[in-house]
Amino acid sequence: MGGFKVKPTAKDIEKLSNTARPMDLKNLTLITGGARSGKSLLAEKFAAASNLPVVYLATMEEMHDDAETVMRIDLHRSRRPKNWQTVESPLSLSTAIFNLEKGEQTCIIDCISLLVSNILLKTNGEGTRMLEARKEVLKEITLVLTAMNERPKTQFLAVTNEVGSGIVPENSLARSYRDLLGETNQLVAASAHRVFLCCAGIHIHIK
């Protein structure tokens, strides 16, 4: 899967969605783990230590009528230094990456798991169109990896969740999410130069 010197066309995108394969991205670190395992904190620690300008790409859609969502977003915002730039991109993460400056910087993506959830719910809200949802997810993730490849001076820190370690979910939508995120995580991890697993606030370098 080659890179693009310009943003892919509609024809390129269709081709990419049918050929989702890992890329060799020296500028990508993936951080995975369970809920509240310290993933975002580790990404923020790495970003601060880079001593580069930081862009924070947030995939959680802010819903002002959802108190829990507002609380979670406010918590994450409170930890970011004021000189970090935040870009909210709940669905088209690849576009946000293509729009980044080409100079040296660090980019946190928090998180891949919410991106997959957002695309799944938009495409497959009732949990019955798995193949269509899978195509849309893989198309966007492939574009994300391609966009990263076009920004070699940007160090990407991508956060995701491990959701397949428990029991098989009861409903089809939850099973679709587990399967799609698992496949996505494998693709991103295979593309990443480094992968860390977080557990109880401790991180393990697994790749």
Image: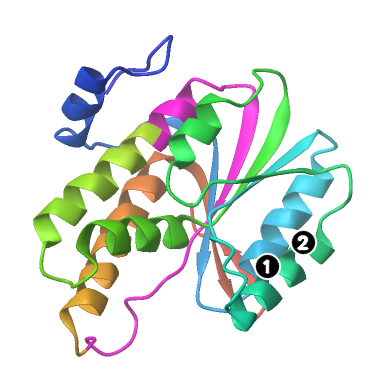
**Foreground pick, 204 / 52:** 52
Question: Of the numbered discs in the image, which one, if any, rests on residue 55?
Answer: none
Residue 19 placement: quadrant: top left
- Residue displayed at 62% across by 26% down: 100
Residue 26 visible = no
Q: Are marks 1 and 2 in contact (CB under 8 Å)?
A: yes
Q: What distance separates the C-alpha of mark 1 from that of mark 2?
A: 6 Å
Name the secondary structure under disc 1: helix
Q: Identity of the amino acid at label 1? A: Ile
Residue found at the far top of this picture: 5
Residue 154 placement: quadrant: top right
- Residue displayed at 54% across by 61% down: 60
Q: Which residues are magenta?
A: 144-169
Q: Is residue 186 left or right of residue 193?
A: left
The crowding category of the residue bearing disc 2, from other C-alpha atoms within 10 Å (few below 14, some 14 to 19, many at least 20), is few
Q: Is residue 173 magenta?
A: no
Q: Quadrant of the N terminus?
A: top left
Q: Identity of the amino acid at label 2? A: Arg
Residue located beneath label 2 in the image: 77
Q: Is residue 27 above or below residue 41?
A: above
- Residue displayed at 40% across by 49% down: 189
The crowding category of the residue bearing disc 1, from other C-alpha atoms within 10 Å (few below 14, some 14 to 19, many at least 20), is some
Residue located beneath label 1 in the image: 73
- Residue displayed at 39% across by 39% down: 191
Name the secondary structure under disc 2: helix
Q: Is residue 31 left or right of residue 56?
A: left
Q: Is residue 85 left or right of residue 21?
A: right
Figure disc tally: 2
**x, y (%) of residue 75?**
75, 71
Q: Is residue 99 above or below residue 186?
A: above
**x, y (%) of residue 207?**
48, 51
Q: Is residue 166 magenta?
A: yes
